[in-house]
Image (cartoon, helix red, strand yellow):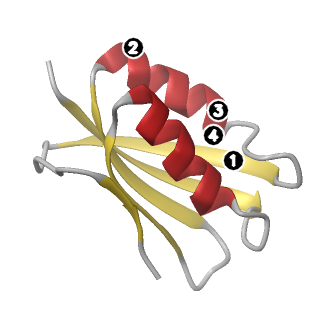
Amino acid sequence: MLKHIQIVITGAVQGVSFRYFAKQQADELGLTGFTENRPDGSVYIEIEGGEENLQKFLDWCRSGPNHAQVKDVIVEEGRPKGYAIFEIKN
């Protein structure tokens, strides 16, 4: 069953290729959606896929790429939007 989640990641998460590595993880797990930097310094992700792979993606988000310092990961469930790919915005 397709699930949709919205994720806000705070901490030192911009300028460390977080969005690039998030796309790499999403592509490897067959997930779709998008990621973007927010003006407040957080990274925002909308992502869809199967529950097991979404959980793997969330586990990765809690540490992120090597130079990231993740402070918090806030997750909300939403309605699937039927994204075709995972893309990096802005």
Residue 60 bears which disc, if any? Answer: 3
Please name the residue that numbered disc 1 is placed on.
72
- CA–CA distance between discs 3 and 2? 13 Å
Amino acid type for the residue under numbered disc 3? Trp
Vertical relation: 41 (above or below) 59: below
| Disc 4 packing (10 Å; few <14; some 14–19; many ≥20) | many
Q: In what element is the residue under mark 2? A: helix
Which of marks 1 and 4 precedes in the sequence? 4
Which disc is residue 61 wearing? 4
Q: Position of residue 24 (x, y in %)?
A: 54, 45
For marks 3 and 4, give the CA distance. 4 Å
Residue at image position (62%, 68%) is: 42
Q: Is residue 18 above or below residue 54?
A: below
User: Are the two marked residues, 3 and 4, in contact with CB atoms closer than 8 angstroms?
Assistant: yes
Disc 1/disc 3 C-alpha distance (Å): 13 Å
- Give residue 5's quadrant in the image: top left
Q: Sequence order check: which comes first, mark 1 or mark 2? A: 2
